[in-house]
Amino acid sequence: TNDPNGFFLLFFLFYFLIIYIFPPCRCQLLFTQPAYNSSIFENSAARTYIRSEVKMGIILGPPRSLDIKYSIVSGDSEVIFQAEEFVMGDFCFLRICTNGGSGAILNREVQDNYTLTVKASAQGGLEALTTVYIKVLDTNDLRPLFSPTSYSFVVSESAPLGASIGRVTATDADVGSNGEFYYFFKNRTELFAVHPTSGVITLTGRPRMDKQDRFDLEVLVVDRGMKLYGNNGISSTARLVLTVERVNEFAPVLSTVAVVPSWDDKDPVFVILTVEDKDEGISGDIEWVSIIEGDPYDQFMVDRSPVGNEYRVKTTDLPNWDTFPYGCNLTFQAKDRGIPPKFSKTQVVQLLVTKPDPVLANFEKDVYVVKLSEIAPPGTIVEVVKISPAPLSVNYSFSSLSDPMYFDINPLTGVIMTTRQLTRISQNFMVMEVIDIISQQQAQVQITIEDANDNSPVFNRPSYDIAINESLPVGTVVLIVSAVDDDKAENGYVTHTISGEQSLPFAIDQDTGEVRITNDVDFESSDDIYTFAVRASDWGSPYRRESEVNVTIRVININDNRPLFEKVSCRGMISRDFPVSQTIVTLSAIDMDELGMVQYKILSGNELDYFNLSPESGALSLKQSLAVDNLKNGIFNLKIVATDGELFSDPTFVNVSVVRGRIPNRGFTCKETRVAQLLAEKMLSKASAMARPRLDESYSDLFSINRQAPQFEALPTSILVREDLDAGASVFQVRARDGDTGFNGRVLKCEYVYSHSHCVDGASRGSCVLGDHYCNEGSMAASLAGPQAAQYN
């Protein structure tokens, strides 16, 4: 007994003898265990057996003749299970399966365990009881469901990346991995993300309300368990509406700086305020900055600068500074446009205002110097004279009226305007005295009237027609064509040119207008009438003015050409018995002029008077027979000339040899001079010159005709003008075009006409807005500060 191994060996032998050697008592049934643990999957099919880690049943002892039956006595009110026995060897197994005849099914979500009491019965009234604990195991038979199925969240436009927007939730009655699920968006989005397990919606991008202020998304859920029946496991969809809003997160920050004003300024500034708001969009806009305390009489106002969030504190009226002997404390506050709006912290500024010294009102200038174009139309703004600082009432007037009355002054605004055209005024410099009748202050206005190129050059004749001798030498002045321009300086300086590109034997002096001969003028070989236009151009700016006149020069034919023989140095022979009056030879001379007939004459060689020369035809013949006399010398050398009655040709010689006996008529041989060819060339040259097109003498200067009216390109329908705009500041631009050329196409003035005018009481038309002479910009002629009308038509 002291040996432990021996003790266990003895115990094992004792147990073996009791159980296997000695048979149990025949009067008792005994289960191997008083209770068994088992499991089965929910929704199991009929006759599905439960599973146990140990075998359930009763051991059969010898002689193994017991017929054991198992039955469920309690714990199965719906008769879901049924007990069966199965004998194998010396063991009767207890087998429990689902009852195929029952309509009930296993549902873990309804009941997840059963405790069955099973009874074993045998013949002879033997019975035994055991307890079977059945655990119903989960299957992925349920899909996750959203609760609720619709979500709506608000997203701030300024929310940081990664911020949580909201959370979607789903439920699944399954357990374990079957009850765990994943969330995801149905469609991909770059701005939002959903956590796969928690369902938290986070911001992954920067939404912009101006681009899209609402997002409609769908969130799906899928569980992690093995899908039953092979479905995809997606069971529920949640609708997610995300609305982008500008959240007014930051309040405005107000900064103030007190300024010592300059009383020389027309509109002094006392405080400069700047406001900053870190919000974006409308939440960052400032609705107003106001004085909430310290100004009970509303003597100050907050004026916003046109650029940025800067504000300036000015006075509404001229304050009574005696009411602020120790200064004043102004409290400011700003409000943004966010929803809900936020207010800045109040800022208190102390104004230590010293009363300005009284300023003597006087004209802004003692002498106003103005340059005015002579073509300025009536109604042109000349100058604006005014007293500064502006008194409560004024009455401007001229101290002495000009004669005639070319100018007028508005008694309330000081706007000096023209009343009529200035082109007829004789003087170029005018001095006017302006006086304020109330304060008796005076100023001088000096007006220099500048010449405008409004006159075109004028010729002293409507046309020129002269006749010249063809024999005039080159360089001769045949005509003076000059024009006069009434304008002054360079606007009246005239240059003369011959217009067109035709080739002429004339040239004109640009300054004097003298027309000179540049090439020989030959009536026989060139045109006998020259018609051209002379253009006179001034030196005006920016456009020249021009005019033209027609000039006709006629060439007179004179006897300036000597006759020329067609043949010279004629030589030949005749017999002594040559017949009298028969033509020996005929001489021919040509005169290039077209004035008369050519006559012929023998100068020498006919002293014996044998020969006769016809003066009209030039035929040489015998006057008497050569056979009656005994000629000692048989050679005659006749010197012959041709004349047109005024000029003689060069003499030519005719050599006649007299021979005895009869000789064949061989004629005379002469030397050709080619005069006929020269005449033909001159006639062809003249015909070509005559065939050239002539200038139409009914010339009209279309360049100087003002045919078209100016047309506006575009006009604004409405214009916003700040009331503190200085006089002379540009208000708007207007453009007009004229289809004419040169000076006629230049638009001189755009006149702004009002249906009513209320710049100040009694202001005449045009006293508020004026246009320049060249129709470019409309500008302020008088300040609109404190106007009595908010709109002008």
Image (spheres, grey):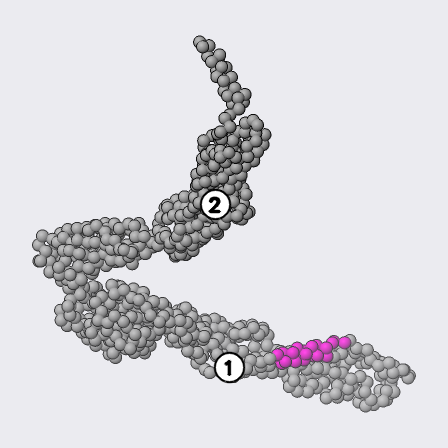
Q: Is residue 93 magenta?
A: no
| Outermost top residue | 2
* Residue found at x 52% / y 74%: 499
Label count reads 2
Residue that mark 2 sits on: 79
Residue 387, percent from left and from top: 18, 66
| Image coords of residue 570 (percent x, y) | 79, 78
- Residue at point 25% right, 70% down? 790
Q: Nearer the viewer, residue 92 or 224?
A: 92
The x and y percentages for residue 203 are 40, 47
Amino acid type, residue under disc 2 in the picture: Val
Q: Which residue is mark 1?
A: 699
Residue 212 visible in the snapshot: yes
Q: Viewer-proximal residue, 175 or 162?
A: 175
Relative to 114, 259 lies left or right:
left
Image quadrant where one finds the N terminus? top left
Query: In front: mark 1 or mark 2?
Result: 2
Rendering quarter of residue 621: bottom right
What amino acid is found at the position of numbered circle 1 in the picture?
Tyr
Marked residue nearer the N-terminal end (1 or 2): 2
Residue segment shown in magenta: 672-692
Quadrant of res 688: bottom right
Q: Residue at x 50, y 76 (%)?
A: 534
Judged from the image, the secondary structure of the residue bearing numbered disc 2 is: loop
In which quarter of the view is residue 447 placed?
bottom left
